[in-house]
Amino acid sequence: MPNDSVIWERPEPPERQVPSPLSRERIVRAAITLADADGLDAVSLRKVAAALDAGPMRLYRYVDTKDELLALMADAVYAEIPAPTGSTPGDVLRSIGRGIRDAALRHEWFADLHGGRPHLGPATLAHAEACHAALHAAGLDDLDARAGAMETLSVYLVGAVRKEVAERRAERASGLDRAQWQHAFGPYLQRMLATGHYPRLSESVHGARHLTASEVFELGLDYLVAGMDPR
Amino acid sequence: MPNDSVIWERPEPPERQVPSPLSRERIVRAAITLADADGLDAVSLRKVAAALDAGPMRLYRYVDTKDELLALMADAVYAEIPAPTGSTPGDVLRSIGRGIRDAALRHEWFADLHGGRPHLGPATLAHAEACHAALHAAGLDDLDARAGAMETLSVYLVGAVRKEVAERRAERASGLDRAQWQHAFGPYLQRMLATGHYPRLSESVHGARHLTASEVFELGLDYLVAGMDPR
DNA sequence: TATTGCTCGATACACTGTATCGGCAGAGGC
DNA sequence: GCCTCTGCCGATACAGTGTATCGAGCAATA
């Protein structure tokens, strides 16, 4: 632990007269621009520094480690998410879910950070606060029920975001759009199912109505919300 | 695409008399041993090769790319998962969930692969087949319902596995065991909540009964399963 | 003005995945 | 038994990575 405090509490170093002034915000913005364009792998300290006309080592004045930069990036995504709305707990939960999903689709690299090492930046905490407040306002008073709802929803969202983004990337990598992929099922999978070793699976793949990613998302959200209802 | 077929269909190169004979299986086993011990980052082609008394380049006879090795590793995990049991669809779904969770806790690195780029190895397909067959046997005949159940469960599991493993790692990294961490809530989080900026959140953190990871897991599973029940 | 202390960035290190290619060993033909 | 040839093995190389170290120079203080 290079500095004995956490990035969220450590003050920024003072600004200095220097060609191309830096700040955590500028650094994070540059990193996010890179990540939006070419994925998380494109975020290296060298490239971020280059985008800011600085030497790589200069960034270490603002951030102790690359993981801290990633944490700041994740927090910046939370800052974009609007406060959830809804008059019933179920609607609030759905609103929370859509807010996170939308943000993740805007910044696909967020999926790689989300659910990993927990970040607890100010925007993340503010988002959590907004969620709890909205649930409370919607009548979900019981603390245990509220915490349980948030925990399980959060689990679901981590998976949803991760899977959907992974699917997008796979489609993009294979150059096929959704419809083509769906129609062909992937030549390989096609062949495997044709072997007859997977009768129930292939029955399902061929027979079931294919759901889009957002349909699956909403479906699971509905299941989860419905299951919480004691009724 | 170096070779124009997929790893699952490409035959292994023939064995040869050579010091320390290789095979995909041996390579994957060595890689899994490394990953179990020190995480996915410890799996480099150089290290895997060294563990097998071979030069790094030799592995490229068996695998075109590191991603393919990772895919084989993920498939090997699926091979360990026992077929789900249960006489109702709900029980089968719970059984599927526990099977995957247990496997992921045995091989934490699996969480880093699970839900990412989709692998469709033979064991993965066999596992999917077993799940569909068990659901069918339990009376979930409707193809759309079955597919929807599997899709949404799978989403949930990706998140559950990822979050739980991340939490374990964070605990391990901070040197605190669960109880200590829970008691202190992390000094930083404690301080943030004490600012009063997050009233509902801190109410929940302090007031709600703290659930263990497996309680959260079961709770979400119950919600999901209950929500699927049309009644 | 002299000194001190901080910051910057060049350099270095250990490591990654993998392309290239020279040489060697085993297999097949005579 | 010998020769050719095919194919694999692994040394080397390359372009990256995160970050430790440290000399040099600048800014602010005494």
Image (cartoon, coloured by chain):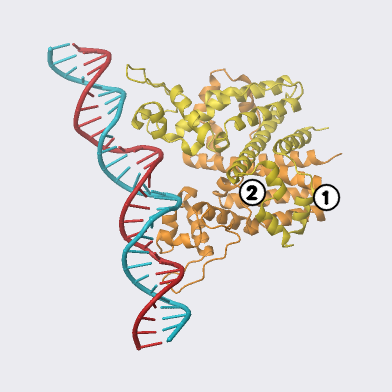
Chain colours: A yellow, B orange, C cyan, D red
x, y percent for residue B41: 46, 48
Mark 2 chain: B
Is residue A101 visible from the viewing direction of this image? yes
Task: Report whether B120 appears left or right of D29.
Answer: right
Query: In the figure, residue B226 lies in which quadrant?
Result: top right
Q: Which residue is mark 2?
A: B101
Query: Quick check: A173 left or right of B129?
Result: left
Q: Which residue is mark 1?
A: B140
- Pinpoint residue B222: horizontal percent, then vertical percent: 74, 41
| Image quarter of the C terminus of chain B | top right
Nearer to us in this view, D8 or D1 = D1
- Compared to residue B64, the image places residue A212 above or below, namely above
Badge 1 sits on which subunit?
Answer: B
Query: What is the spatial separation of the Cα atoms under label 2 and label 1, in whole angstroms?
Result: 23 Å
Kind of element beneath mark 2: helix
Q: Residues within 10 Å of mark 2 (few under 14, many from 20)?
A: many
Label 2 in the same subunit as label 1? yes
Q: Does residue B126 appear anywhere in the picture?
A: no
Q: Which of disc 1 and disc 2 is earlier in sequence?
A: 2
Q: Quadrant of residue A59?
A: top left
Seen at 68% across and 22% down, the residue is A84
Relative to C10, residue B28 above or below: below
